[in-house]
Image: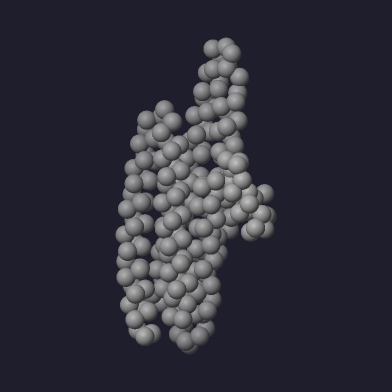
Amino acid sequence: MLIDLTIKQFLERVASGEPVPGGGSVAALIAALSASLSEMVARLTLGKKGDPALDEKMSALIDAASRLRARLIDDVDRDSDAYASVMEAYRMPKASDEEQNVRKAAVQDALKDAACVPLSVAEAGIELLKLACTAVAAGNSGAVTDGIVAVLTARSAVIGALYNVRINLASINDEGFRDDLAHRADSLEKEAFAIETDVLSLAGSVIKKQA
């Protein structure tokens, strides 16, 4: 499994001439890193101010970030597996009409799965942006830059994953499926940039207070 590689090994695999792991797996990985950073900020805040309401908010952040991190760890391999399934489908025999029909159906099914995996990563990234916003707004101000990096990595994961959605949609024949995912992708992209703008503005205010 890709996720069991060391950081150095994973980077070497990405840098190799092989198509996987590629951008989709990397998007899932950086989303998981965003989750880890928000979780860290929450842990650095929990129990430090004697504020039960704040502790409850940080505990909820930890639980949500931990859940998303576990899901995204799986997505690192799921994305590469989905790509491999598309390539396997394209290699199916096509000598007869029957074989061609079977192959076309397999390719379309594999492409749909290859579009759904990064869409799931993008949806998780939106949740992570919201968690990072909480980390920046209410977390330990000494860790605000960690929250900022959580924001930036989550946004990058969303946008990168959505481009992987779109590249697969371009080859999908099911118009209803294609249009539905395209609309969801556009909405997620707008939401990601809007949240990023708001939270980075907020982060600037937090940093200024420390000056």
Residue at horizontal 63%, vertical 59%? Answer: 7
Q: Position of residue 46 (x, y in %)?
A: 51, 80
Measuring 34% from the left and 46% from the top, which residue is drawn there? 186
- Work out whether 101 lies above or below 44: above
Question: Could you tell me residue 137's position as x and y percent?
Answer: 38, 75
Nearer to me, 54 or 194 = 194
In the displayed structure image, the side of residue 13 where residue 152 appears, left or right: left
* Residue that extends furthest to the bottom in the rendered view of this protein: 50
Type of colouring: one colour
Can residue 77 be seen from the camera position used here?
no
Work out whether 64 lies above or below 114.
below
Q: Is residue 113 left or right of residue 202?
A: right
Residue 177 in which image quadrant: top left
* Residue 203 visible in the shown view: yes
Rendering coords of residue 176 (x, y %): 37, 33
Instruction: Find residue 71 and report its horizontal and vertical position in percent.
Output: 56, 55
